[in-house]
Image: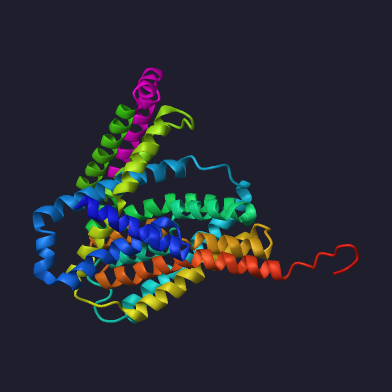
């Protein structure tokens, strides 16, 4: 079964290369569609024979574990990202990138509640939905964004560090707001208080763990036995994820705490251990995508709500591209750089899908809302490359002709 899922991953990567997209986007597309495609091809009984219940549950656990391990590396990178532009410029860009998407998220929430199709909003508490939708509209996929920046090279100029560092800051805030949404869904204000109490305890434990891991003797032992260090770190991440889930939060926040716990040693053994853990998680990610696709499309009887999908996608693009553009202009950047910033932060990718999956699992998002926002996440991410190429083409067409020897 894992071999078949590996074939799904390879197919997704081939599709991504053909479409000139980040590899993870191809894996997401093929992974989410693999289960529904097999269900349509084999029918219900044939699909149950291929994937019986006694295999489906363990595979779901493997997929969740892969997601947690992968996110440990993502969070560690958020904490220790590359040096960025000046604080004033970064603050203004971050304000634009965060505030306008929050506003468009609230507009979308209002439409869902009062003008959307019946049943689209579901039965989740109103405050939870009003927090969840703006958070889902404001996140940026830092790993995918970093891949896009790496592929594009220095041609992006100052837009690259401005976009990357603002995304790092805002995704950190988004995880905290996600905890608020989960708390509101679980028990109103008392649920929020409980969520933050659990998060505070987790942060204290992470702080203590970081101090312990940073001790010279333990660091030296990790350097001597790198495999054992990676196994220990992976075990701690899964333990933190289990604890977060048991506290009524999401296992994703356990990965966040584990990433915070790792000491900052760019060339040290713990950073190398994080890289190993993240690679293992990366290999298992297709299991998560396939499991999400199977669960969503087999348990949801509804079809894709096209009106919600189109509106959500339009508002998402306006919020992120417009927010990044206005924030960068406010920071003193030229229009071309500002437009590149807006296009870059519109890359939602895996982070968006994780946030949506958490909201759906908590009962905040209905299957229809999940599908609409999933399409939005994929469309906005796929648009990043073509829009950057369009900006580059427009810039090249406006360059003055080079004169050589007096002849144009």
Residue 120: where, in percent of width, then height?
Answer: 27, 76
The answer, for residue 248, to whether it is visible in the render is: no
**Image height of 130 relative to 71, above or below:** below
Q: Closest to the observer: 171 or 150?
A: 150
Considering every residue shown, the one lying at the far top of the view is 217
Along the line of sight, the residue nearer the viewer: 171 or 52: 52
> Against 16, is 300 above or below?
below
Q: Where does residue 373 sit, x and y in percent of width and height?
A: 36, 69
Q: Is residue 98 left or right of residue 220?
A: right
Q: Give me the residue at 46% from left, 32% from top.
A: 264
Q: Is residue 173 left or right of residue 248?
A: right
Question: Is any part of residue 209 visible from this angle?
Answer: yes
Quarter of the image holding residue 327? bottom right
Identify the image's colour scheme: rainbow, by chain, secondary structure or one colour: rainbow
Which stretch is magenta?
Answer: 198-226
User: Principal SS element in the magenta part?
Assistant: helix
In this view of the protein, which residue sits in the foreground, 337 or 188? 337
Q: Position of residue 75 (x, y in %)?
A: 40, 44
Residue visible at 49% across and 52% down in the picture: 147
- Residue 378 locus on image (x, y percent): 40, 66
Check the image and report above or below for 210 versus 71. Answer: above
Residue 209 covered by magenta stretch: yes
Q: Is residue 92 magenta?
A: no
Q: Is residue 403 left or right of residue 380?
A: right
| Quadrant the C terminus occupies | bottom right
Identify the image quadrant of residue 292.
bottom left
Identify which residue is drawn at 15% across, 50% down. 58
């Amino acid at each position: 079964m894992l071999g078949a899922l590996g074939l799904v991953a390879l197919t997704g990567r081939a599709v991504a290369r053909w479409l000139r997209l980040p590899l993870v986007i191809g894996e997401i597309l093929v992974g989410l569609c693999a289960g529904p495609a097999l269900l349509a091809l084999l029918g219900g009984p044939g699909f149950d024979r291929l994937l019986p219940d006694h295999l489906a549950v363990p595979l779901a656990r493997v997929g969740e574990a892969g997601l947690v391990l992968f996110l440990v590396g993502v969070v560690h990178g958020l904490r220790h990202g590359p040096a960025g532009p000046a604080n004033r410029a970064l603050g203004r860009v971050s304000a634009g990138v965060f505030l306008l998407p929050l506003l468009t998220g609230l507009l979308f929430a209002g439409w869902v509640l009062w003008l959307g199709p019946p049943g689209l909003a579901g039965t989740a508490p109103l405050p939870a939905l009003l927090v969840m939708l703006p958070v889902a509209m404001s996140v940026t996929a830092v790993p995918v964004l970093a891949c896009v920046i790496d592929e594009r090279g220095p041609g992006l100029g100052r837009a690259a560090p401005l976009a990357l560092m603002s995304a790092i800051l805002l995704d950190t805030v988004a995880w905290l707001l996600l905890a608020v949404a989960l708390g509101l869904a679980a028990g109103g204000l008392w649920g929020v208080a409980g969520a933050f109490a659990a998060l505070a305890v987790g942060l204290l434990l992470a702080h203590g763990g970081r101090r312990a891991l940073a001790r010279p003797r333990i660091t030296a032992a990790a350097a001597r036995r790198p495999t054992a260090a990676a196994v220990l770190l992976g075990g701690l991440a899964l333990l933190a994820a289990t604890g977060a889930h048991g506290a009524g939060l999401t296992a994703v926040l356990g990965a966040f705490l584990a990433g915070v716990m790792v000491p900052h040693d760019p060339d040290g053994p713990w950073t190398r251990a994080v890289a190993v853990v993240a690679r293992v998680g990366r290999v298992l990610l297709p299991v998560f995508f396939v499991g999400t696709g199977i669960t969503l499309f087999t348990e949801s009887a509804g079809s894709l709500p096209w009106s919600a999908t189109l509106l959500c996608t339009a508002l998402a693009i306006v919020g992120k591209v417009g927010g990044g553009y206005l924030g960068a202009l406010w920071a003193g950047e030229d229009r071309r750089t500002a437009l590149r910033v807006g296009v870059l932060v519109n890359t939602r990718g895996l982070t968006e899908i994780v946030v949506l999956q958490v909201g759906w699992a908590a009962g905040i998002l209905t299957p229809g809302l999940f599908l609409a926002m999933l399409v939005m996440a994929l469309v906005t991410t796929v648009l990043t490359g073509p829009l950057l190429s369009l900006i580059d083409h427009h810039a090249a067409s406006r360059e003055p002709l080079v004169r050589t020897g007096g002849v144009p």
